[in-house]
Amino acid sequence: MALTLPTDAGDLVQYTPRPTAPRSAKGAPPSSRVLYAAAHVVADPLADNTPGVPARPDWGATMAFRHHLWEHGVGVADAMDTAQRGMGLDWPTAAELIRRSGAEARSVGGALGVGVGTDQLGPGEHGIPEIIAAYEEQAEVAVAAGATVILMASRALASAATGPEDYQRVYDHLLGQLPEPAILHWLGPMFDPQLLGYWGSQDLDTATDTFTSIIEANRAKVDGIKVSLLDADREVALRRRLPEGVRCYTGDDFHYPELIKGDDQGYSHALLGIFDAIAPAAVAAVRALDSGDQATFDRILEPTVPLSRHIFRTPTYYYKTGIVFLAWLSGHQDHFRMVGGLESARSVPHLAQLFVLADEAGLLPDPDLAERRMRLFLELSGVAQ
C-alpha cells in the first residue's frame, strides 16, 4: 500500500515501497580491504535520555548490534562520533561501552577499534600535560579491552594548541606509549565545528604537512589513518603520501565506493559511519571486489550513495539521527529514541526521504516491518495514512 510522505517543500506525496529480497552476507571478513563500521549506541527508551543528562544505553540491544556487524564480517569501530561521543555519550558511559564491546569481541574473535580522546576534561582551557594525561587515561581502558586504539581528534587540544609543534608533542608521546600501532583520526569541522584548524592550521595543505610529518616520525606505531574530510581528491593525495604499511581508512561518507575501489596507485580501506546502516551491502560489494568483479561492486554500492549523502547532509554532525532511524526501520532496535534526545535533530520530511532512499537501494532487511514502522512514525508525526 502507498504511504503518504511529507516533503521539504511542504507537499504530501504518495510512495509505494518496493518488494525487495533481503540481502544476506554473513561470513568471514573480505580479504582485499579492511572494513570497520562506526557503530551507534541504542538508548534505553524508558530511561531519562534527555539533553544534558548522562547517557543510559540499552546494553543488550547495543551489544546485539555489534554482533550483527561481526556476523557480516565487518569490524566494529566503537565509542566514536557515531556512538555520539561529545553529543550525548559521556566518558564514563563510553568507558563502559569499550569494556563491554571488548568482552563481546573476544567471545567471537571480532575486530574492534575504539575511540580514545579527551572528553572527560571539563569546559575551559587545559594545558598540554593535562590533555596528554586525559588521552592516556582513555588509552588504558582501550588497551585493557584488547581493542585497537583510535586516537580521536581532541576539542581540548584544538583549543589549547598554539601551533603544529603542540600536535607533534602530543601525538609523539602518545604513540610512543602505546603497546600496539594505533589509527589516527582526522575529523573535519563539518562533523565537529570545534575541530576547525586541527593540526595547527585552517589551511588544509599546511595541516596535511603536519599530519604526515607525525606519521613519518612514528610510522612503526601507526596502523593507519581515518580521514573524514568529505574531499575525495584530498584523501587520494594524502593516501599516496603515506609510508609503506600505513593504511588509509576512508571516512568519506560521500565518495566511499570510488575510494575503496581505488586506482592503479592504491586504494582506501574503510572506517565509516554509513557502514553501520549498510553493512550487508558493503560486505557483499567488497567480497565481489576480492574476486575482481568491479561491476558487481559498483552495482551494489552505487545505489547506497544517495542515501548516505542524504543522511550526512548539512548539518553533517546530526547524521547519527538518520543512522538510528534506519536501525529502527531495519529491526535492530525496538524504538526510535536516542541518548541526548537526538531523535529530534532531523525533520519528519528528512526521515521520510531517508526511508525512500533506503527502500530504493534495497537496504531494508524486512520491508514489511520497515513499512509498518514508517507508517506508525508518520501517523505519530501528524501525517495521516
Image (tube, rainbow, N blue to C red):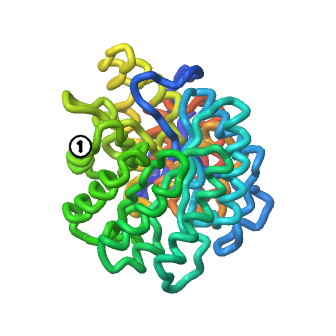
* In the foreground, 164 or 177: 177
Name the spot of residue 32 as percent of width and height, x first: 40, 24
Left or right relative to 139: residue 102: right
Q: Residue at x 43, y 43 (%)?
A: 223
* In the foreground, 338 or 29: 29
Q: Residue at x 61, y 37 (%)?
A: 330
Left or right relative to 175: residue 245: left
Left or right relative to 306: residue 378: right
Name the spot of residue 290 as percent of width and height, x first: 39, 18
Q: Residue at x 62, y 52 (%)?
A: 142
Name the spot of residue 26 as percent of width and height, x first: 59, 22
Q: Tag 1, which secondary structure?
A: helix
Considering every residue shown, the one lying at the far bottom of the view is: 124
Q: Is residue 203 above or below residue 362?
A: below
Residue 333: quadrant of the picture: top right
Considering every residue shown, the one lying at the far right of the view is: 46
Residue 327: in sight, yes or no?
A: yes
Name the spot of residue 16 as percent of width and height, x first: 50, 33
Residue annotated with mark 1: 236
